[in-house]
Structures are given as C-alpha cells and as structure tokens.
Amino acid sequence: MNLSRRGLLAATTATAAAGAMAAAPAAAADRGHGGGRRLRTGYERLAADGYRLLDGRSVGIVTNPTGVTRGGPGSGGVQHIVDVMHADERIELTAVFGPEHGFRGTAQAGGSEGRYDDPATGLPVYDTYQTSGQDLADIFTESGVETVVFDIQDAGARFYTYIWTLYDCMEAAELAGLPFVVLDRPNPVTGRAALGPVLHKEFATFVGREPISQAHGMTVAELALLFNGEFLERPVELETVWMSGWRRDDFYDASGLPWVPPSPNMPTPETAVVYSGTCLFEGTNLSEGRGTTRPFELLGAEGIDRGWAELANREELPGVDFREAYFEPTFSKFEGKTVGGVQIHVYDREVFDPVRTGIALLITAKQAWSGFAWRDDNWIDKLTGSTRVRTMIDAGADTDEVVAGWQDELADFRAVRRKYLKYR
C-alpha cells in the first residue's frame, strides 16, 4: 500500500483544485461564546464564502438528514442545507441524491426512499443506495448536474455505509466526467488513531470496499483524498472544503454542533463511541440492541444471565464497565421477547478501545452462552474484513491473541493513512 504515482497525481490535483477553501484547516480559527473554539463545517465555510467554489455550476448534492447548518436568532433554528441552498440565489441547486435510509431519513437499515420529488423544495431526489459504477454515473448524467457535492455525517467505522456511498459517488462522478466536492464534518469519535483489522480485498462489500481499518480515525474529506490517491482506478477531479475549529482529539460534543442521528440506530454520539466494536454482533445470533433505546450499547439473547457481565468485567478492559441487563427489542432479533445480556458503560472514552472491547465481548459471550452462533452467511467475516477473527475465536484464542493478529497490517495502513491527514 505504498503511495503510488496515481496517489501523488490525485493529491496534487486535489490540492490545486480546491484553492483557498481547501487550505489546511486551522484548529482554532473561529471563536464561539466565552472565547472557546467554534467549529465551522465545510458547508458553513462554503456558504460564508458566498458559494464561490460552485459559482456558475448546476449542483447536485449527496446528503441525508445530517446535512444541517446552525441558525441563530431569527434564522429558523437548525436547518437542512438543501432547504437553505434552495432558497439562496447565489447557488443553483438542481438535484439531491439520497443514500441508505434516504435523503430525509425515512427508511430503516437496508432501505432507501427511491426516486421522488422532495415536497419541501420540489427538487428531484435520486436514490443511490446499492447503485454504483456506470449505473450510478448514468443517474448523475440523467440529473443534468454539472458538479456533485457530498455532505453527510459519518460515524467513524469501516462498515458504516456512507463512506462507501462517498467512494461509489466519486467513482461514478469520474465516469460521468463531473467534478466532485466534499464538504467536511467531524469524525464523532475523534481522528486520533486507526484501530482494528484491515479489510482483505477478497471480502469487499458495501460494508467495506477497500482495505482500511475497522475504525479509520479520519474525516470524510480525508477519506476522499485517501480513496482518490490509493484505491480509485481513475481519480476524480476532487475539491475539498475543510472544517475550521476541529482537532483530531475532539469528540463530537466538543464541536458545538447539533447531533442528528445519521441512521435510525445511531441515536446519540455515545452510540458512535461503541459502534465500531459492538456492531460485530450483527454477525452473530445475539441482539445488537436494535429495537431498543440503546442500540449497540445493549447486547443479549434468550438464555443469557449475569454470567456474561461477570466474564466481561474480568477482562479489565480500559475505560469501560459492563452491567447485567435485560431488555425487550421492539423489532429485529428477539422482537417482543425478554432477553438477557449486558449494557456497556464507557466511563473513560479517552482510553476506551471499541474494537478490542467488541472482540472481548464476542469471546466472553461464546463462553457464557452455549447457544452462541455466527450468522449462517458468515457476515462476521465481511464486518471484520477476513476469516481471521472468526476462526481464531472458534479455536479458543483470547482477546490479546486476536488483537495481535492484525497489528502488522494495521501498521501498514496507518503509514498510508498518515499521508492524507489534514487536521492537527
């Protein structure tokens, strides 16, 4: 994964094209009330500059309910950027492209909203979910847009599908001959480190197109640079609008931004803190907490008792405790049934390692419950990026042994990742 000639070309092109709006972000450029830092998103910086980067272009935007901007007195409060741009004569917004869950967020996991005209703006909304390559390029061409813009809040995990919507849209924009603009937003769980196993290419799916780590520790604009430089066969004409006021060690609550759930089962920033580890339970027959008010923080199944929490606490994982818990999911696994398991309580997120925690919970769940099983389709391999985690756990490996198994490939990815990091 050394930086290729294509990577050098893509990085040079992106830097030159973006101009002043893509200059290296200043961590403390803006001040909020009381003298503290005020984060400004890529969109807010673009709008403050009068949309000059998009001047004279017909624009289509890939977004969802997280594409919001803060208001103020008399502004109408927190508003969606599509509504704001549609009413602004300085920009010609002509189409919207919706990802999984849809533009307005009406669909559950694995669903989308289809093709329709947005009632609020009258704009045509096109469905990108599970569409890629030339088929997606044809949608861009059909829409008549001259530039594609991306603005979606990510959750920081490889298997969260919006970063692969970004990847697919970049590829399709290049096929359609269109420039691509990424408006940056924070990684809600910080950008300090890459954690976990790296995807093996033969396990590529929509929950992981390319070999990045399970928790990538990057913003969407940094990922766009990485995709363009390392993975896309033909780099797109890429422009990025960076945030100001964001630092790599910031969790989401430091941003001052309102939290809009990026998907129905990501209700709070605290969900995102654990998600890159506990989403692995989607690959098992246990509930990952869907259908509860604390998805990915509540885990369990029929037949599990307090023994699992006891085993998990013996692991002495940094920054987290486990509580015996009982819950009744309203949908998904064990719908309408009372199940036992654990609730995750992160008491020190600075030292908490979500991926290591997820592995330890898989191992202890298998020890505590004789009914433990992997999903028949080996979905766990797609989530972890190879067969290694599943086969090592089945062979009786402990947490340290499983985590040690991916360290070499993680070190290689970290070296590549470092070249595309833009924030201090």
Image (cartoon, rainbow, N blue to C red):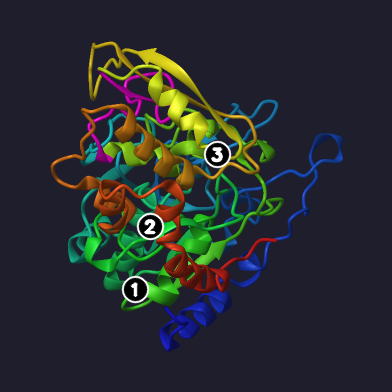
- Distance, label 3 to label 2, CA atoms, is 34 Å
Magenta span includes 297 = yes
Placement of 205 over or under 323, stated as above or below: below
What secondary structure is marked by label 1?
Answer: loop
On the image, the x and y values in percent for residue 150 come to 43, 54
Dot 3 corresponds to which residue? 317
The percent position of residue 154, horizontal first and vertical second, equals 46, 46
User: What is the distance, in whole Å, between disc 1 and disc 3 at their CAs?
Assistant: 38 Å
Q: Is residue 383 left or right of residue 270?
A: left
- In this view, the residue in front, 385 or 314, is 314
Which amino acid type is marked by label 2? Answer: Leu
**Label 2, residues with CA under 10 Å away: few <14, some 14-19, many ≥20:** many
Marking on residue 232? 1
The mark that comes first in sequence, 2 or 1, is: 2
Label 2: which secondary element: helix
Upstream in sequence: badge 3 or badge 2:
2
Front in this rendered view, residue 39 or 194: 194
Residue at 77% across / 44% down in the picture?
37
Using the image as rendered, state which of residue 162 and residue 348 is in the foreground.
Answer: 348
What is the crowding at mark 3: few (fewer than 14 residues within 10 Å), some, or many (at least 20)? Answer: some
| Most distant residue in the bottom direction | 5
Disc 3 element: loop
Residue extending farthest front: 396
Q: Amino acid at mark 1?
A: Leu
Asked whether the beta carbons under mark 3 and mark 2 sit within 8 Å of each other, the answer is: no
* Horizontal relation, residue 393 to residue 114: left or right: right
Q: Which residues are magenta?
A: 283-302
Rendering coords of residue 47 (x, y %) = 60, 50
| Among the two numbered marks 1 and 3 on one chain, the one whose residue lies closer to the N terminus | 1
Q: Residue furthest right?
A: 35
Image quarter for residue 34?
A: top right
- Amino acid bearing label 3: Leu
